Image (spheres, rainbow, N blue to C red):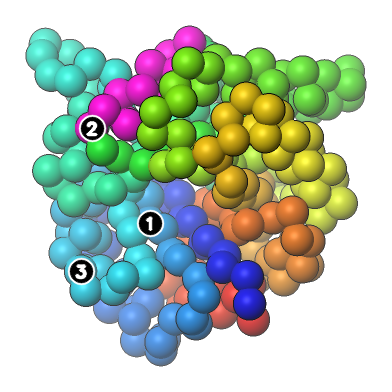
């Protein structure tokens, strides 16, 4: 059976008190299936609560949603990889489309964050994806190649710790997921780019309106090594069911 990753991006939801309650409900839904990993990306202030709550579960990991690239200093409001790590994070999202499009993060900045994450011993989950306008203009592959290049070029060391997530911006939070074929087509292109420029990276997740109804169909596509889920990860029972359905 193929190993699959189920990554939950809680975005700006679920504080530390709610996180404890969430995990109680999540675990009460029963054993996780074998052959899969579950990764939680809570808000930074909830990381410690989640890390404590999942301690002892080897197939569950915790990460932050973003880090700043400087290791420490006068950067009010920012957190470094080392600080995230102290709180229990083992991973970090980098370049999520909301960082890029709501907060104006550039390709160059995502590159610095990948480097900072690796330096702090955090595994980066690098998000790439095109907007609807870019897709309609036939620029999907060019945009994604540029994002990959900016984030990964010259970062051979630690490459094997990076996972890529393909998240088309038009599919995020819209209820409009890419079809399994759409996703697989882009995953193939990403895989070809990685084979050439960053051969240490082997895992590609799909994200964008993944839910209980479409997860099995998406993961039936062998190009997808897992899913990165926003809205459908916020309910603990629903998330446990999604993991079980996708891993089956
Ligand atoms: P939704 O699953 O809510 O579309 O969000 C996807 C996402 O952005 C995960 O990082």
Q: Nearer the viewer, residue 29 or 140?
A: 140
Mark 3 lies on residue: 55
Residue 225 location, quadrant: bottom right
Q: Does the magenta stretch include residue 118?
A: yes
Mark 2 lies on residue: 120
Give the overall secondary structure of the magenta segment: helix
Q: Residue at x 41, y 38 (%)?
A: 124
> Would residue 226 be visible to someone looking at this image?
yes
Q: Residue at x 87, y 51 (%)?
A: 181
Element type at mark 2: loop
Left or right? Give the position of 12 relative to 196: left
Tell me which numbered mark, 3 or 1, is placed earlier along the sequence: 1
Give the residues in magenta: 108-120
Task: Measure how far apart labels 3 and 1 are at the Cα level.
Answer: 13 Å
Element type at mark 3: loop
Tell me which numbered mark, 2 or 3, is placed earlier along the sequence: 3
Q: Does the beta carbon of the residue at mark 2 sit less than 8 Å from ligand 1?
A: no
- Quadrant placement of the C terminus: bottom right
Give me the disc on residue 165.
none
Classed neighbour count for the residue bearing mark 3: other residues with Cα under 10 Å, few (<14), some (14–19), many (≥20): few
Q: Residue at x 45, y 34 (%)?
A: 159
| Badge nearest the viewer, 3 or 1 | 3
Tell me which numbered mark, 1 or 2, is placed earlier along the sequence: 1
| Badge nearest the viewer, 2 or 3 | 2
Classed neighbour count for the residue bearing mark 2: other residues with Cα under 10 Å, few (<14), some (14–19), many (≥20): some
Mark 1 lies on residue: 40
Figure disc tally:
3
Q: Residue at x 50, y 34 (%)?
A: 126
């Amino acid at each position: 059976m193929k190993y699959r990753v189920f990554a939950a991006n809680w975005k700006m939801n679920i504080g530390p008190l709610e996180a404890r309650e969430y995990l109680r409900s999540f675990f009460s839904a029963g054993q996780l299936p074998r052959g899969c990993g579950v990764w939680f990306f809570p808000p930074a202030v909830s990381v410690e609560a989640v890390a404590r709550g999942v301690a002892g579960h080897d197939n569950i990991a915790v990460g932050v949603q973003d880090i700043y690239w400087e290791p420490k200093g006068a950067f009010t409001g920012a957190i470094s990889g080392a600080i995230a790590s102290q709180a229990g994070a083992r991973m970090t999202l980098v370049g999520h489309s909301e960082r890029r499009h709501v907060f104006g993060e550039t390709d160059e900045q995502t590159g610095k964050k990948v480097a900072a994450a690796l330096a702090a011993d955090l595994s980066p989950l690098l998000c790439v994806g095109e907007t609807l306008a870019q897709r309609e203009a036939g620029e999907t592959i060019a945009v994604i190649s540029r994002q990959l290049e900016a984030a990964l070029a010259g970062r051979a060391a630690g490459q094997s710790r990076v996972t890529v997530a393909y998240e088309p911006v038009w599919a995020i939070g819209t209820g409009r997921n890419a079809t399994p074929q759409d996703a697989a087509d882009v995953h193939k292109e990403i895989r070809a780019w990685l084979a050439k420029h960053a051969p240490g990276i082997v895992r590609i997740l799909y994200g964008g309106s993944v839910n209980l109804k479409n997860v099995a169909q998406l993961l039936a596509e062998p190009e997808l090594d897992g899913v990165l889920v926003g809205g459908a990860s916020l309910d603990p029972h629903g998330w446990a069911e999604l993991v079980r359905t996708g891993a089956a």
